[in-house]
Amino acid sequence: MKGTNEQRAGLLSGIGAYGLWGVVPLFWPLLKPGGAIEILAHRMAWSLGVVGIALLVLRRWSWIGELVRQPKKLGLISVAAAVITVNWGLYIWSVNNGHVVEASLGYFINPLVTIAMGVLLLGERLRPAQWVAVGTGVAAVLVLAIGYGQPPWISLTLAFSFATYGLVKKKVNMGGLESLTAETAVLFVPALGYLLWLGARGESTFASEGPGHAVLLASTGIVTATPLVLFGAAAIRVPLSTLGLLQYLAPVFQFVLGILYFHEAMPPERWAGFALVWLALTLLTWDAFRTARRTRARAQAAAAQLAARPARRTPPAGDSASTSSGAAPRP
């Protein structure tokens, strides 16, 4: 019963995390007339405060000293911080400038970009179905590029920046809360400096648009940290295959919001491109389940074969005839 409750809690946490990431396009327009860079700077600054409080409550500080003594890891953290800055900033700009559907496409094709980077940078080998999925994804980008008259730069930048972020995070190998704290600590000083510069020029909206606007800007830290905490709770309670499926909730929600709430256009060529992307993701999901099932079946077969092996019998201690003659113990 406890295991079932744990899995149910993990599933609900995962749905909550990806659901919040999926509906976050509703939040960023509330922060207008703040510009994308100002909103991003507030997000960086306030996120450090939120995760700092979380670490204080959980009393998880020991990793800081270890991190400071590892320059290579600090360098990777800085790279991750720079890459996620690009991702966050472009995403906020996209939502507030009528590109929600194109932004959702970036997170749809992110798994395909991650696989391609694994081949190009890590020398990973793909299964045939994965090659077909990647090829289908490339075809989707070509169709969209022809339809737009140019490559879908927003989608590609979001996908490649987040895939790069994931690759760096894998090398850093830190917990979600700890790594976010380290990244926001790196970003805090430039973010605060930019906000102070805006204030000195009289261009900051934090104080000029009323207390409600100031509260919304401050809440960007909670909006950033809450889904991450839920994701961390899900990651330790549900199988990786389940998390892999849940990750599509966010771009699905964003896509639906882009069409039904923000009323963005969906010409035929855009539908065709999205259809190819969804076909590629279906192939990836099918291949992942098939591979997991085969791996599980092989493990069960090996366990059954091991259990069926006759146990070796130890001869009685007084059986001197067999031991003195040098004969091997009988099975």
Image (tube, rainbow, N blue to C red):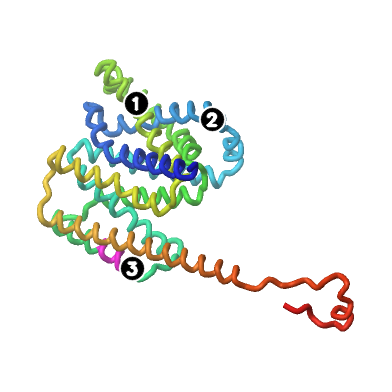
Magenta-drawn stretch, dominant element (helix, strand or loop): helix
Horizontal and vertical percent position of residue 193: 39, 27
Query: Is residue 133 magenta-colored?
Result: yes
Marks 1 & 2, CB-CB < 8 Å contact: no
Is residue 8 placed above or below 164 in the rendered structure? above
Residue 272 in view here: yes
Q: Quadrant of the C terminus?
A: bottom right
- Residue at the image point whose x is 40% and y is 54% from the top: 241
Q: What mark, if any, has residue 129 been given in the picture?
A: 3
Whichever of callouts 1 and 2 sits on the residue coming sooner in the sequence is: 2
Horizontal and vertical percent position of residue 175: 50, 42
Where does the magenta region start and end?
A: 129-138
286 and 188: which is toward the camera:
286
Task: Give the amino acid type for the residue marked by disc 1 in the picture.
Answer: Ser
98 and 50: which is toward the camera:
50
Crowding near the residue tagged with mark 2, few <14, some 14–19, many ≥20 C-alpha atoms within 10 Å:
few
Horizontal and vertical percent position of residue 313: 74, 72
Horizontal and vertical percent position of residue 13: 39, 39
Identify the residue under disc 1. 219
250 and 35: which is toward the camera:
250
In this rendering, would 86 be left or right of 259?
A: right
Whichever of callouts 3 and 2 sits on the residue coming sooner in the sequence is: 2
Query: Is residue 313 magenta-colored?
Result: no
How far is the residue under mark 1 from the one under mark 2? Answer: 21 Å
